Each structure stands twice: as structure tokens, then as C-alpha cells.
Image: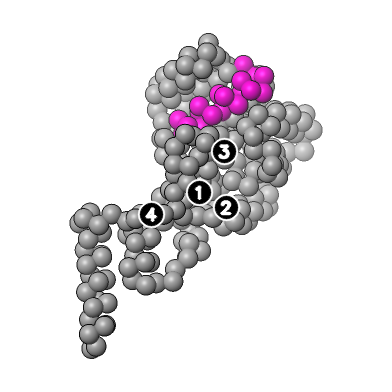
Amino acid sequence: MSSSKNMSLMQRREVIMGLAAGSIVPFVSGCADNAALGRSQLMLVSDGQLAQLSDQAWRDSMQRERVLRDPSYTRRLNRVGQRVVDASGQGHMDWEFVVFDSDTVNAWVLPNGKVGFYKGILDIMETDDHLATVMGHEVGHVAGRHSAERASQQIAAQVGVSLLTSALGANQSTVEYSDEIGAALGMGVTLGVILPYSRQHEYEADRLGVDYMARSSYDPRQAVDFWVAMSTLHRGSTAEFMSTHPSDENRITAMRAHMQARGYT
């Protein structure tokens, strides 16, 4: 074996052992500042990759789910959705709002602006302010680029991808990690359930959502009322919309603190 091959093997062993021991910290250049969040984010996934996977996930959903044809539901969702989107500053995206004919208590949005609400969750929303609460939260995930960040975190967790690709001289692309990216879209590409975002993401989406409610002339105080009602539903049964979120008490406490700081109460 040549000396260059021996050196390559030694480098590989050192990199892998260092990563395992935690003595080597991957240097990640894919960080970006997010003004909406006031912090920087790890970004190893391009908007183009997420858009492509989001488009496919949306097509799959439209084929798998039954779309509700009741115009009263559609008009309500579009009316509230467009107002919240305009307030969020994300109006440049190609938004689409669809109601699915199911009693499931769930709602989700993809990074490409495709929004799915189930009839079940709309039926328990007594006011448009309640609908704006959930819509604001979901749009907050888009503005916060949480799907891209979550996908990047999952990729980086694969034994320090960014360091290994450099140290081992591999010509890898994030395309190889389409499963990880797909899992971070905000819904399962095949399962159709919301992603368990990190608790930080959920709190950020709550704060952004309340701000969007206020900007679009909805009553942000009703956001607390809605989440309190949802917490009661959550205790009685496993509501998909709440199954991956922070504890009810913690999220409501954090929301109230944010609203007080903003002067919404």
C-alpha cells in the first residue's frame, strides 16, 4: 500500500474517532442570520431542494387526501390565511390553502407555502381569531425557516457530514440525504403527519404567530384562549396537532409572557 493511501486511512480513522469522542467539532460554514428570529441558523439545505421536495409532498397529499368542496370552509381558510400571510411578509411565495375532508384535528404548512387544514380542526375554531392563531403559528414555521434548519440539523448529525466530506475528500451532496430533508418538511412525505420540530421552533412559531395576528388585525389574546381549549382536548385524547408540541402549560406561559412584553394584553 502506498504511503499516500496509508495517510488517507489514518486521516479517516482520526476523523471518525475524533467525531465519536467529541474532540473534533465540525466547522460549519452554512450558517445564516434570520431577522425574523433574531438569531443565526445552521443551513446546509438549499431552498431549491426544499421546494422540490415540498412540491412532491403536496402532490402526494392532494392524491391521498380528500379535498373538502364546501365553499364556506374554503372561503374562510383563504380569507384568514391571506391576511396572515400578508402580515408575515411572506407574500412573495405561491401560497395555496386547502381544506381536507377529515375529522382529524390537524393542520400543517410546507416550506413552499402549501397549507393543509383538516375539517376537524376548523370545526372547533369558534372565531376567525382562533383560525388565525393556528395559521400564524404555521406561517411562523415558514418565516423561521424551521424546516430547512431541522433538515440541516439532521444531516449534520450524520457523523458530522460537513467535516467528513471535506476531510475525506468526498464529493457528496445534500441530495444524498433526501430522506432527512423530506422528514423535515413540516409533514411526513408519506405519512402526512406534522414533524416533531424542536421545542425552540415551536416557541418561535408561537411568538411569530401572535405577532402576525396583531399585524393582521386579529385579536392575539384569543391565541391563549385557543391553546387552553386545545390543551383540554389534548388531555382527553391524542390530538395530532398537539402531539409533538411543548407541554401545554409551558407554551401557554411563554405565550402570555411574549404578549405582555409586546403590549398585547
The percent position of residue 101, horizontal first and vertical second, equals 68, 38
The residue located at (28%, 54%) in the rendering is 25
Which residues make up the magenta segment?
Answer: 202-219
For residue 28, which numbered disc appears in the image?
Answer: 4
Residue type beneath disc 1: Ala
Judged by its main secondary structure, the magenta piece is helix
Q: Nearer the viewer, residue 53 or 239?
A: 53
The residue located at (54%, 55%) in the rendering is 46
**Is there a contact, CB below 8 Å, between mark 3 and mark 4?**
no
The residue located at (50%, 55%) in the rendering is 45
Q: Earlier in the sequence, mark 3 or mark 4?
A: 4
Q: Nearer the viewer, residue 222 or 66?
A: 222
The percent position of residue 52, horizontal first and vertical second, equals 61, 57
Give the colour scheme of this rendering.
one colour
Q: Earlier in the sequence, mark 1 or mark 4?
A: 4
For residue 47, which numbered disc appears in the image?
Answer: 2
Q: CA distance from mark 1 to mark 3?
A: 11 Å
**Is there a contact, CB below 8 Å, between mark 2 and mark 3?**
no
